[in-house]
Image (tube, rainbow, N blue to C red):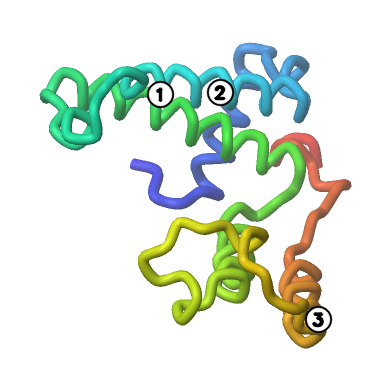
Amino acid sequence: MIDSLRDLAAQLNRFAQERDWSQFHSPKNLASALVVEAGELLEHFQWATEAESRALSEEKLAQVGAEIADVLLYLVQLSSALGIDPIAAANAKIEVNALKYPVSLSRGSSMKSTERIRPIDPDLVKRVQALVEGVEVDLDAPLSPDDE
């Protein structure tokens, strides 16, 4: 069983290469496929009430799980194609969100940070910039281990 994103990306690259599909896996195509799969996931909830969306049958839960897997697989492939470490990017994004949505201003509220009227804190801007700079993107990264 694959238990890391790096191993999953390698397995997906091998899978695509064995079928000569890598030629179709441009970032644009992978992003498009990701959105299509996310839409298929959404279809399972489209007309459900809040309560129904939380109480799925075993069959529906299995179908939703398959769509979640499709979304994850395309997201991992897209990250690999762009040389982005999705865990590092997610950790940086959580830090940015923590700065944008401090508990004191956000607890129990769904208001977007842009909807709050407040002066821009120059220190906050510097901290967000520093966090974003910490995410490395290797545009020269091979799409698969065999491309090295």
Give whichever of discs 2 and 1 has the lower sequence position. Answer: 2
Residue type at tag 2: Phe
Q: Which residue is mark 3?
A: 126
CA gap between label 2 and label 1 equals 23 Å
- Number of the front mark, 2 or 3: 3
- SS for dot 1: helix
Label 1 vs label 3, nearer the camera: 3
* Quadrant in the rendering for residue 96: bottom right
Label 1 belongs to which residue? 41
Q: Position of residue 12 (x, y in %)?
A: 55, 31
Question: Could you tell me if residue 39 is visible in this image?
Answer: yes
Residue pictured at 31% horizontal, 18% vertical: 47
Q: Nearer the viewer, residue 43 or 103?
A: 103
Which residue sits at x=79%, y=55%?
Answer: 137
Q: Is residue 44 above or below residue 75?
A: above
* Quarter of the rendering occupied by the C terminus: top right
- Nearer the N terminus, badge 2 or badge 3? 2
Does dot 2 land on a helix, a strand or a loop? helix
In the displayed structure image, the side of residue 120 where residue 62 appears, left or right? left
30 relative position to 74: left or right: right
- Mark 2 or 1: the one toward you: 1
Name the foreground residue: 40 vs 134: 40
Farthest front residue?
Answer: 117
Residue 73 to residue 91: above or below:
above
Q: Residue at x 67, y 69 (%)?
A: 117
Q: Residues within 10 Å of mark 1 (few under 14, many from 20)?
A: many
Q: How far apart in space, not on screen, are marks 2 and 3 (Cα)?
A: 42 Å
Residue behind mark 2: 15
